Image (cartoon, rainbow, N blue to C red):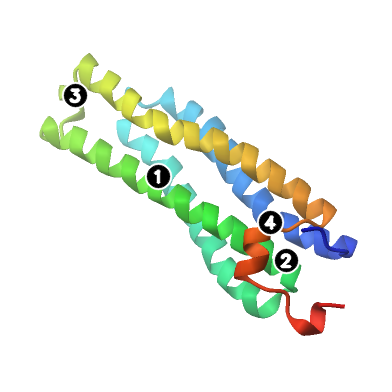
Amino acid sequence: MLFDISEQESKQARHPHEYFLINLITNHILVFVALLGMAKTYPWVLLITPAVSILILSYLMMRARRALKSDTWFVACHWQLCARRSKFFIAMLALLGVVFTGLLLSVGGDTSALRPGHKALGGVLALPTMLTVLTLIVMESDAVHKAKIGEVPDWLVKKFPKPAADAA
């Protein structure tokens, strides 16, 4: 649904999506690729990416809760949209963590004991997370556009109805 909003509201509603995009593009693509170069020598350095991501996603979740009390309805809705996607991404990261923990446990926790087959399996098992990152980049880019033009998805309007005081 389209709503008539101010430029300030539009700008505030774009913030959660922009933070999420920064996490996805900078952290999960650029930083991760940079860390891959160091992973052969220091394999645990790859944990920087999910650690930073969890910090950013935690902020987005906490700020979304606060937005329900402190922000305008339109801005709060966009924070809720971002929080929903953040929860999904946290679940994907947790699943990836469980998979890699299982892979490490299969070789007794010794990363030097990983054979090429283990590494290939790890890459295949990481594929759903990589596809999720790319899908979320597209979805969040669209959400930035929707925040700019004053649009809120219908399902979100039903879940968080516009207060009567703001209905005018």
Residue 15 sits above or below residue 111 on the image: below
* Badge 2 amino acid: Val
Could you tell me which secondary element the residue under label 1 belongs to? helix
Q: Position of residue 33 (x, y in %)?
A: 49, 27
Task: Return the disc, 2 or 3, that comes first in the chain's sequence.
Answer: 2
- Mark toward the viewer: 1 or 4: 4
User: In front: 115, or 112?
Assistant: 115
Task: Return the disc, 1 or 4, that comes first in the chain's sequence.
Answer: 1
Separation (CA) of disc 2 from disc 3:
49 Å
- The quarter of the displayed image where residue 129 is located: top left
**Split into 4 quadrants, where in the image is the N terminus?**
bottom right
Determine which residue is flagged by label 2. 75
Q: Position of residue 153 (x, y in %)?
A: 68, 56
Q: Is residue 45 left or right of residue 148?
A: left
- Mark toward the viewer: 1 or 3: 1
Circles 4 and 3, Cβ within 8 Å, touching? The answer is no
